[in-house]
Image (tube, coloured by chain):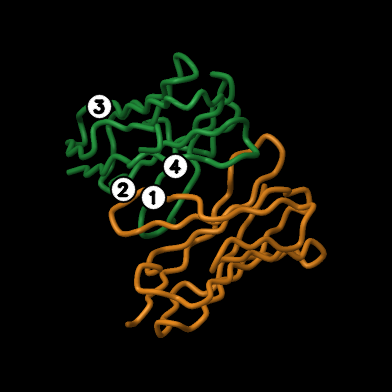
Chain colours: A green, B orange
Amino acid sequence: ETGVTQTPRHLVMGMTNKKSLKCEQHLGHNAMYWYKQSAKKPLELMFVYSLEERVENNSVPSRFSPECPNSSHLFLHLHTLQPEDSALYLCASSQDSGHEAFFGQGTRLTVV
Amino acid sequence: GENVEQHPSTLSVQEGDSAVIKCTYSDSASNYFPWYKQELGKRPQLIIDIRSNVGEKKDQRIAVTLNKTAKHFSLHITETQPEDSAVYFCAAHTGRRALTFGSGTRLQVQP
């Protein structure tokens, strides 16, 4: 167990639904990340939080909304997604941004 | 921003042979270069990393080399085994930004 836990592991949602992905890290890290993994772009950075402050947003559509209430928790709120948003969403954490990133097991999202 | 290119996209070797995966990066300020292994259905996990103040690092059958002048780094796996079969990702880090990953190499080790 790497200490980064994501829930749910699998999610199927309709295009009009609203859902949230949750990530929790027990490693005492101060940086957390959301990555999207699909066949088109294997590991695509979405958002970066450092000390609970969003420091990077890689031109992600507004239908994805991150939230970092504290240094141990990270959420990704989803609404009105498109079928092309179906992918594996990976959360990661690190101690500062220049160190090893530990990944969660991911949430496999299917938008129908 | 940083751009990382990785080659080849697929690599098939016979058990016992060596495998080499190469990456180039664009930002000369990048200073941390990890390699991740992702087995089917599992999360990416760090296997080795190197910082810009060294040129080579080894850990048993795995080694990484870094050429800062040419802005490229490589992963070398010797005496490959079937359990080495996975997707390998290189990455580069600059300043406060998160890791930028290459597109991945699917390694298949034939028994």
Tag 1, which chain? A
Tag 3, which chain? A
Instruction: Label 3: state its secondary structure.
Output: strand
Specify whether disc 3 shares its chain with disc 1: yes
- B56 relative position to A106: left or right: right
User: Mark 2 vs mark 1: which is more N-terminal?
Assistant: 1
Instruction: Label 2: state its secondary structure.
Output: strand
Query: Looking at the image, which residue is at 54% across and 34% down?
Result: A94
Instruction: Provide the residue designation for mark 1.
Output: A37
B23 and B56: which is toward the camera: B56
Query: Looking at the image, which residue is at 17% across and 36% down?
Result: A14
Amino acid on which the number 1 mark rests in the picture: Gln
Label ID, residue A35: 4
Query: Looking at the image, which residue is at 27% across and 31% down?
Result: A7
Amino acid on which the number 3 mark rests in the picture: Lys
Q: CA distance from mark 3 to mark 2?
A: 15 Å
Give the number of the mark in front: 3 or 4: 4
User: Mark 3 vs mark 1: which is more N-terminal?
Assistant: 3
Instruction: Label 4: state its secondary structure.
Output: strand
Amino acid on which the number 2 mark rests in the picture: Ala
Say if mark 2 contacts mark 1, CB within 8 Å.
Answer: yes
Instruction: Provide the residue designation for mark 2.
Output: A87
